[in-house]
Amino acid sequence: MTRIATRLWHTLFVLLGLTVVTFGLLNLAGDPAAVLASPDATPEEIDEFRREQGFDRPLVEQYLSWLWRAVQGDLGYSYRHGGPALQVVLESLPATVVLVLSSLLVALLIAVPIGILAALRRGSRLDRFVISLSVFTQSLPTFLLGIVMILVFAVTLRWLPSSGGGDVRYLVMPAIALAAHQIGTYARILRSSMVDVLDSEFVRTARAKGLSEWAVVVVHALKNASLPFITVVGLQVGELFGGTVIVETVFSYPGVNRQAVQSIMGQDMPVVLAYILVVGVLVSLTNLLVEALYGVLDARTKERA
């Protein structure tokens, strides 16, 4: 309980820091009143709008006022949409969560088998292929892969829709484009961990006892090799949420990151701050889940916890 409470305190400080930085950067981008006011508004009307929205107050006072309302559950109202900022974020959040989980599933389904096979056949052509694939996918720009996929599968072959959201067909290309970078990373990390574990004494003992190769690899080796692998996967969740910004833009996918980009361009500060808080909480909860999995998989970690 003490460990969880400590992590929760750390999470609160991280979220506080994120909101401070975001609030400052949004105000450095220019005068919000000039951007949000009507295009044909006079200087007097812009000044009146600035006073109504509180933009004429000192920046610190504006932030503390927003923070006090946020603690009470009020994240403000969107200047563009006219509704609660949190509601604007939550309406588009499920699409991004589905995209992130789909890309994670695609990456794991491909990376785990080839990572294990590469470790079992180290030095072979398959092993060299996995290492080369890792380097290639990590250096491949996501936006370039997305554009190529649109040209091939949407424009030329007409198998999949090029943009928008809807049924599972709209999810295929964005999920693959987002997962491509992760596949090489996961396969390389798992392969390295498996190579180290397969040379361990307890693995040789398991084989000497006559256990099948499947039991040795899955029950003994994979369980111990999964600790660093799970760490990397947990840390990459935040990168996946960030990576969806490019994917959602290329495919015009109706996710929360695309909504956040539009809000940043329009200086809709309540929506941007609500987005930062929601995504920060999701990433923090993922890190807590990773720690819980450590306690399950590693007996030594469980005893210390």
Image: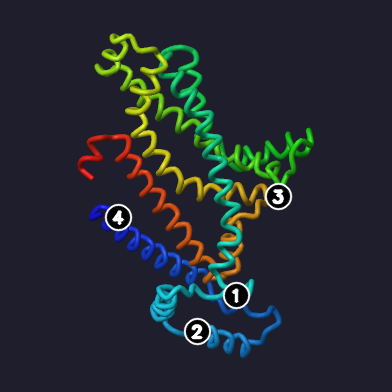
SS for callout 2? loop
Picture layout, residue 100 above or below residue 255: above
Query: Are circles 4 and 3 on residues that touch, CB within 8 Å?
Result: no
Mark nearer the N terminus (4 vs 1): 4
Viewer-nearest of discs 3 and 2: 3
Q: CA distance from mark 3 to mark 1?
A: 27 Å
Separation of marks 2 and 1 at Cα, in angstroms: 13 Å
Can you identify the residue that label 1 sits on? 79
Earlier sequence position, callout 4 versus callout 3: 4
Q: What residue is at 33 percent from the left and 18 percent from the top? A: 198
The label on residue 54 is: 2
Give the labeled residue for mark 3: 166
Q: Nearer the viewer, residue 216 or 106?
A: 216
Residue placed at 36% from the left, 64% from the top? 17
Q: Earlier in the sequence, mark 3 or mark 2?
A: 2
Residue 115: x and y, percent? Answer: 45, 24
Question: Image quadrant of residue 210?
Answer: top left
Label located before the other in sequence (3 or 1): 1
- Position of residue 135 relative to residue 198, above or below, is below
Q: Which circle's residue, 2 or 1, is located before the other in the chain?
A: 2
Amino acid type, label 3:
Gly
Residue linked to disc 4: 7
Q: Residue at x 65, y 55 (%)?
A: 254
Residue mark closest to the camera, 2 vs 1: 1
Q: Amino acid at mark 1?
A: Tyr
Q: Quadrant of residue 148?
A: top right
From this view, report whether residue 124 is shown above or below residue 247.
Answer: above
